[in-house]
Image (tube, helix red, strand yellow):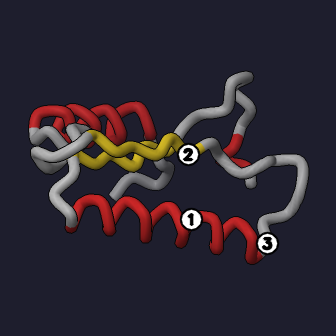
Amino acid sequence: MDKTYNPDAIEQRWYQQWEQNGEFKPSGEGTPYSIMLPPPNVTGSLHMGHGFNNTIMDLLTRYHRMKGDNTLWQPGTDHAGIATQMV
């Protein structure tokens, strides 16, 4: 194992594999259903509301998937490219 994390080498390899396996494609043959998720606000601390919000979106996506809908739960990115990984 390398001493330091090299995101370029590791993440690019995994991303290509996910693309090839169709991991980002919606599943199901029914009515399309999607949730686009913005990242949490980086100007404050995470709190229980963030977890509750994610739980609701997870529940809705799973419900529609079980109904056979063509579902996609897509985490989003900040419009300004703010370093959300520092949360």
Name the amino acid type tagged 1.
Asn
Q: Which mark is residue 5?
A: none
| Rendered-image quadrant of the N terminus | bottom left
Q: Are marks 1 and 2 in contact (CB under 8 Å)?
A: yes
3 or 2: mark nearer the eye: 2
Cα distance between the residues tagged 3 and 2:
17 Å
Q: How many marks?
A: 3
1 or 3: mark nearer the eye: 1
* Direction from residue 16 to residue 56 in the image, left or right: right
Q: Which mark is residue 37?
A: 2
Which x, y percent locates residue 79?
68, 24
Name the amino acid type tagged 2.
Leu
Marked residue nearer the N-terminal end (3 or 2): 2
Which x, y percent locates residue 30?
16, 46
Secondary structure at badge 3 equals: loop
Name the amino acid type tagged 3.
His
Front residue of this view, candidates 54 and 2: 54
Query: Image quarter for residue 60?
Result: bottom left
Front residue of this view, candidates 68 and 86: 68
Q: Which mark is residue 47?
A: 3
Q: Which mark is residue 54?
A: 1
Marked residue nearer the N-terminal end (1 or 2): 2
Cα distance between the residues tagged 1 and 3:
12 Å
Front residue of this view, candidates 42 and 35: 35
| Rendered-image quadrant of the C terminus | bottom right
57 relative to 13, above or below: below
